[in-house]
């Protein structure tokens, strides 16, 4: 019975790995090899597709642009969400619980609904084709979930710690820096992970708010996919490179992420 139970997660893991494996195989093939007979592995592996991506400014700047606005989004979202989460956790005011859950409604909205308003607003402020425009637009979706997650972590800290810090003469800023932030560091890591990954994979707003200078890799892939449909190895290689940031985040933050997912709001 126990062995049968292990088969389900193993089969599911294999189901998830197969598309990634095939994408990796395609990235190492040439166009001519793809047009030939089917093979489950590259017969003549080549890194030419990856070389093109890292040598062509039109390609590698897409990753740079996406990383810039994703990191900006993480910084803004966490800077706004930490004090907001503290306020929801420690203070009571009329409609606080209703407002807290209304925030989640913003996260449930489809980005397509807000594309036209965002384009008009950022056009008025001359921010189209800038990283900050995409970062701020993504905050509309990331800040609510960041507040929701971090409120759970702040609430897990006993109020007695706040009172002790106040007696010891800690101001609010010093309390945040010296006590609160270290205590909720796993929650901040989890929040940063969700915010970064949303910004990294979101396509509609990032593509609609940029034209040339800040165009992300998702927009480049969409454009290339329409005109380079036959060049599947190049698109596969670009997609493999796009997986790297998420993998690196998980590797370097795995301890914080493990603690964070077992605590607070995401438990």
Image (spheres, rainbow, N blue to C red):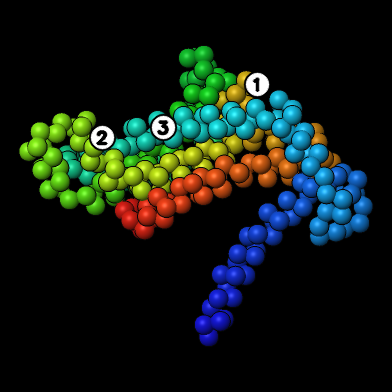
Place of residue 97 in the rendered image (x, y in percent of width and height, measured from the top left): 24, 46
Mark 1 lies on residue: 212
Among numbered discs 1 and 2, the one appearing first in the sequence:
2
> Is disc 3 in contact with disc 1, using a CB cutoff of under 8 Å?
no
Which residue is at a point 33% across and 53% down the rendered structure image? 265
Locate residue 233, reporting x and y percent: 79, 44
Q: Disc 1 vs disc 2: which is toward the camera? A: 2
For numbered disc 1, what is the local secondary structure? Answer: loop
Q: Residue at x 74, y 45 (%)?
A: 236
Q: Is residue 236 left or right of residue 177?
A: right
Q: Residues within 10 Å of mark 3 (few under 14, many from 20)?
A: some
Q: Nearer the viewer, mark 3 or mark 2?
A: 2
> Which residue is tagged 3?
75
Instruction: For mark 2, give the secondary structure.
Output: helix
Seen at 20% across and 32% down, the residue is 174
Work out whether 261 lies above or below 189.
below
Q: How far apart are the alpha carbons under marks 1 and 2?
A: 39 Å
- In space, the residues marked 3 and 1 are separated at their CA atoms by 24 Å
Any part of residue 260 in sight: yes
- Residue lying at 73% horizontally and 34% vertically, measured from the top left: 53
Residue at image mark 2 = 177
């Amino acid at each position: 019975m126990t062995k049968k139970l292990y088969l389900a997660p193993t089969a599911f893991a294999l189901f998830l790995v197969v598309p990634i494996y095939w994408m990796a195989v395609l990235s190492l093939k040439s166009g001519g090899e793809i047009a030939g007979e089917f093979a489950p592995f590259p017969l003549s592996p080549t890194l030419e597709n990856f070389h093109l991506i890292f040598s062509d400014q039109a390609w590698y700047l897409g990753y740079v642009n996406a990383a810039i606005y994703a990191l900006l989004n993480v910084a803004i979202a966490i800077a706004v969400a930490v004090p907001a989460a503290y306020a929801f956790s420690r203070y009571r005011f009329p409609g606080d619980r209703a407002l807290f859950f209304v925030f989640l409604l913003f996260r449930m909205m489809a980005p397509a609904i807000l594309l036209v308003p965002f384009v008009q607003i950022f056009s008025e402020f001359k921010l189209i084709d800038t990283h900050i425009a995409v970062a701020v637009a993504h905050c509309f979706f990331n800040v609510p979930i960041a507040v929701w997650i971090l409120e759970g972590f702040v609430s897990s800290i006993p109020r007695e710690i706040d009172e002790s810090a106040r007696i010891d003469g800690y101001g609010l800023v010093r309390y945040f820096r010296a006590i609160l932030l270290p205590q909720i560091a796993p929650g901040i890591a989890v929040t940063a992970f969700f915010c970064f990954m949303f910004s990294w994979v979101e396509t509609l707003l990032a593509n609609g708010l940029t034209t040339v200078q800040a165009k992300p890799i998702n927009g480049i892939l969409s454009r290339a996919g329409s005109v380079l449909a036959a060049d599947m190895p190049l698109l596969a290689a670009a997609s493999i490179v796009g997986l790297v940031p998420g993998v690196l985040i998980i590797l370097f933050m795995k301890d914080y992420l493990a603690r964070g997912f077992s605590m607070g709001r995401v438990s």
